[in-house]
Structures are given as structure tokens and as C-alpha cells.
Image: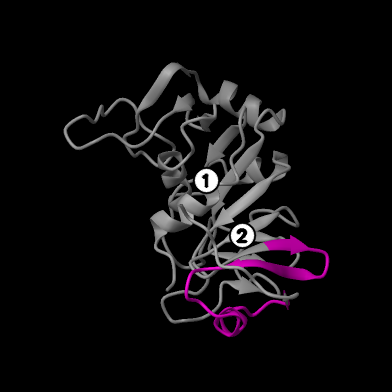
Amino acid sequence: MALDKNQIAKRIAKEVKDGYYVNLGIGIPTLVANFVRTDISVEFQSENGVLGMGPFPFEGEEDADIINAGKQTITTLPGASFFDSAFSFGMIRSKKVDLTILGAMEVSENGDIANWKIPGKMVKGMGGAMDLVASAENIIVAMMHVNKAGESKVLKNCTLPLTGVGCVKKIVTELAVMDVTSKGFKLLERAPGVSVEEIIKATEGTLIVEGEIPEMVLD
């Protein structure tokens, strides 16, 4: 079966290593903090000026003054710090962040990402997306493989305005884990119960399938 959004975040959490500084984008990426192993030390950075984010708060424990870049209430871990946006983007632009996890509307087979604008529709704006994709060297995208109409969002070429060019390294969707290579998307893992044929059908871009493709391990 295809993964839900929490399961996508849980799989991406396996990519977070001890000692990493990690920026979480709006949407599915914000869920990743809930699933990181408890035996490693990770600092989550939010572009609105927080270092040391923890999981989302339980109902009734929210503090409206402590939020992430998506204006969701968050918790902070011991030793967390707060600072202004200039300082925050200084961290991002000087490549202090080890891993950036972003949502996307589209990703192309050469690693282009479109995640900030749909022409003709009202959007909040690009936020820090441009800075993040221009500065980060390790970008993982969390996204749905197809849109509500069943059309692929994993494309040969993006159709929406680009946020960044050739910057995405890995994609995790409800169907698969894929690396972005010079020859296209390389299929690494498939969601439990999802066949390779289903992933091929849902992928417009070039998909490289080599040997047996294992199922994701989420636990």
C-alpha cells in the first residue's frame, strides 16, 4: 500500500544522521522531527529563527509564540535558541545546514524543483525556498508521486516555475525512494505492497530499475 504523509516522514527520518543540522520545509518535512531516533543528537533549524526544534506539541501544550516557518506550533529541546531572520539565513547561505528536507509540487529527472508557485493561484510566496536550494548541498524532497488527478509529479521537465536547478539529491514519495542521477531517477526502494510496475506507471521521467527493488523498512 502507498505510504501516508507520516510514513513518508518516518522513512526520511532514517536519512538524518548523528550530529546533523537539518532544515525542515513546510508540509510533510515538518513531520520528520517526530520520527528521528532518540539515540542520536540532531539540531532542527527553522528559517524563521529557531535552532533546536522538537516534535509537535500535544494538544493543550501549544505555545502560540513558538512556531516553525509554516506558522505551526512546535516544541523546543533543551538548549534551543531563537534569533532573527538575518541570522537564520546567514546559517543557510554559509552552508551550516547539513541536510535540507523540502516539499515539492514537481521534481524533474535532472533534479530541478518547483515548490513555490502555481500560476493563476494565490500562494503565500516563496519564503526561504530560493535560499535553501541555492545553498544546500544535500536536499531530500518529500512529496506525493502523483497529483489529485493521478498525473505524475516526477517528471522529465518541470512545468511550474522553478525554485532551483539540478539541486535535488533524493526523493521519497508515497510509492518509492529514488536517487536523482545524471541518467534519471534511480529506484532504490518501493513502498510495502507497491509493485515496480505501479511506480513506473506513476513516473513520467526516466526511471532506472536495476535488479530486485526492496521494500522500505519503516520500523
In the picture, measured across the screen, residue 77 lies left or right of residue 46, that is left
Q: Residue 156: x and y, percent?
A: 70, 75
Q: Amino acid at mark 2?
A: Ile
Above/below status of 217 relative to 53: below
Q: Give the Cα distance between marks 2 and 1.
A: 13 Å
Question: Where residue 61 sits: x, y (%)?
Answer: 21, 29
**What range is drawn magenta here?**
179-207
Residue 162 seen in the figure: no
Q: Secondary structure at mark 2?
A: strand
Whether residue 90 is visible here, answered yes or no, is yes
In this view, the mark in front (2 or 1): 1
Residue at image location 49% in from the left, 18% down from the top: 83
Residue at 69% across, 31% down: 93
Residue 28 picture location, percent across and down:
44, 52
Question: Taking 180 as reference, is 67 left or right?
Answer: left
Which mark, residue 13?
A: 1
Q: Is residue 72 left or right of residue 145?
A: left
Three-letter amino acid code at the position of disc 1: Ala
Residue 193 highlighted magenta (yes or no) = yes
> Which residue lies at the image location 62% right of the left edge and 27% below the top edge?
19
- Numbered mark located on residue 171 in the image: 2
Mark 2 Cα-neighbour bin, 10 Å: few <14, some 14–19, many ≥20: many
Instruction: Please report contact status of discs 2 and 1: CB closer than 8 Å, yes or no.
Output: no
Q: Position of residue 145 (x, y in %)?
A: 53, 71
- N-terminal of the two: label 2 or label 1? 1
Q: Residue at x 55, y 83 (%)?
A: 198
